[in-house]
Amino acid sequence: MKTSDFDFFESPINLLAKFPTQERDESKLMIIHRKNQKIEHKFFKNLHEYFEEGDILILNNTKVFPARLFGNKEKTEAKIEVFLLRELDPKDRTWDVLVDPARKVRVGNKLSFGSELTGEVIDNTTSRGRILQLNFNGSHEELINKIKELGKTPLPKYINRQPEKNDEKRYQTVYAKKEGSVAAPTAGLHFSKHLLKKLEIKGIHLVEVTLHLGLGSFLPVYVEDISKHKMDSEKCFINENTCKMVNFAIQRKKRICAVGTSSMRAIESSVSSKKKLNPFYGWTNKFIFPPYNFSIANSMITNFHMPKSTLLMMTTAFSGFDLIMKAYQIAIEKKYRFYSYGDAMLIL
């Protein structure tokens, strides 16, 4: 398939969710049945109705890092936004970053984020970013705390507003544990503590993986031949206990649901030759697009994504092209909310 095939709907600006719903599980939930092509309309709080005792939900427990810094260029005092993608070397205090406006920031430029934290651009990256070396008088732990103090919640650019205090909580899942993402695993934002408890009481197992999200999976695909697209690598961890529970559920033919494209990418990065889940500790640049045979999950939860995005391509690979095209058309007609703070779908 070609990238242009995934431009089958106009990005609905009026349906772009700029703020979350008042309650996490009050978002809409579209139920898509692959076998009979049936589509239902529920609320996320009804999720437990579609799972039985012994079924599995796979959650990504990554935690969003306050990765957006605002500083000034030395001498000119020009305002520069710095987006911290990942720490490259704790000892040298070097970071892979994006800068805005990029045209104003060159190798050798020095940036100030206040009296205690400065940085120098020491190189360019292949992904049109920069390598920034931070200067701070303190330990690594103190540096990270300073970044957290100065950093802002990294809301996606398309939300087009400044982050508010509430975003610190709502652009984070209630089960977030392991810090390292610069974007939220958005399918997980709909889970309230009350809903998680309902699922547990029903005997549905909640297991966790960790995949630290960078910006790569959220960027559009620019090449027409999607097989030529290269995903950025992201850190991924799957422990032995998660594997045991998932593999036991596979053996018993239970419903196994990947909560979000990041959970799906994590588990598909570590499949054995016998179609079982293996422990994983490393980096993955797994890119899933049609046609693709999924090995572990037989259902998935995901939000409504941007045209031509890798997220939409994975969703299409799982559901089928015609069915997902129909679902998006219905979502627009029924005014579902789109993107990170938007509504969700459950594909069965």
Image (cartoon, rainbow, N blue to C red):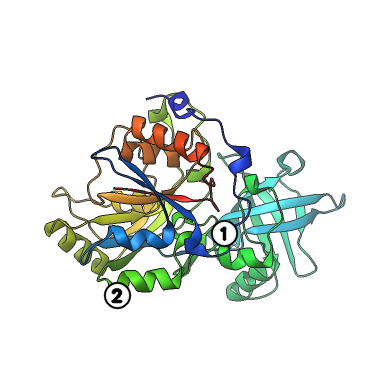
The secondary structure type at the circle numbered 1 is loop
How far is the residue under mark 1 from the one under mark 2? 25 Å
Q: Residue at x 43, y 39 (%)?
A: 312
The quarter holding residue 1 reads: top left
Q: Nearer the viewer, residue 235 or 107?
A: 235
Numbered tag placed on residue 21 in the rendering: 1
Left or right of residue 8: residue 134: right
Marks 1 & 2, CB-CB < 8 Å contact: no
Tell me which amino acid carries mark 2: Ile
Q: Nearer the viewer, residue 115 or 197?
A: 197
Q: Dot 2 surroundings within 10 Å: few (below 14), some, or many (20 or more)?
A: few
Mark nearer the N terminus (1 vs 2): 1
Q: Is residue 188 visible?
A: yes
Q: Residue at x 32, y 69 (%)?
A: 199
Tell me which amino acid carries mark 1: Thr
Left or right of residue 253: residue 133: right
Numbered tag placed on residue 201 in the rendering: 2
